[in-house]
Image (spheres, helix red, strand yellow):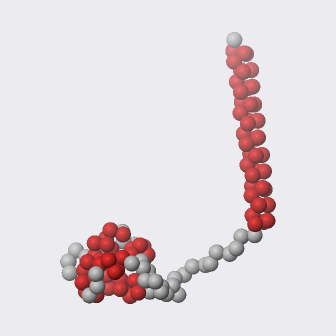
């Protein structure tokens, strides 16, 4: 093993097979160890050789993945009526803001015209 391997890469290599068997793919594992996909991919040959499998096998995500160790919050169903109501309120605010901006621009243009005429 190269002396150039940093600690994160080394730990990833030690943990790769276990994490892969739990259902994590190469992208997941790279993110966990804050490594680039290419860094992990480069080390797959060494990992595969040590595990006695082909590199291609390590690129596949296991079909029966165990995601119990992942921390995530399931997405709640959206109440369509509340969403539409919130969206309508938001759009009314956007419309009011656009009107205010247009009015301000109009006021500035009128002020500029008056000033130009006074300077003549």
Which quadrant is home to the C terminus?
Answer: top right
Q: Is residue 8 visible?
A: no
Residue drawn at x 29%, y 78% as measured from the top left: 55
Which quadrant is home to the N terminus?
Answer: bottom left
Residue drawn at x 64%, y 75% as measured from the top left: 75
Judge left or right: residue 67 versus residue 74: left
Residue drawn at x 35%, y 86% as measured from the top left: 17
Q: How far across and down, in percent of the image, does residue 31 sit? A: 42, 73
User: Can you say whether 80 is above or below 104 in the image?
Assistant: below
Q: In which quarter of the view is residue 25 placed?
A: bottom left
Q: In which quarter of the view is residue 49 placed?
A: bottom left
Judge left or right: residue 82 versus residue 20: right
Judge left or right: residue 48 versus residue 94: left
Q: Is residue 45 visible?
A: yes
User: Can you say whether 96 is above or below 46 in the image?
Assistant: above
Q: How far across and down, in percent of the image, does residue 88 sit? A: 78, 55
Q: How far across and down, in percent of the image, does residue 60 sit? A: 39, 78
Between 95 and 109, the one nearer to me in the picture:
95
Q: How far across and down, in percent of the image, does residue 67 sit? A: 51, 85
């Amino acid at each position: 093993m190269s002396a150039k391997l940093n600690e994160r890469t080394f730990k990833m290599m030690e943990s790769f097979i276990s994490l892969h068997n739990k259902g994590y793919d190469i992208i997941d594992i790279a993110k966990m160890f804050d490594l680039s996909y290419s860094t992990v991919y480069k080390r797959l040959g060494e990992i595969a050789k040590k595990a006695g499998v082909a590199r291609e096998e390590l690129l596949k995500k296991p079909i029966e993945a165990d995601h119990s160790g992942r921390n995530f919050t399931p997405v709640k169903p959206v109440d369509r009526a509340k969403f539409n109501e919130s969206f309508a309120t938001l759009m009314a605010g956007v419309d009011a803001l656009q009107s205010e901006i247009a009015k301000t621009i109009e006021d500035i243009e009128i002020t500029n015209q008056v000033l130009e005429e006074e300077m003549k």
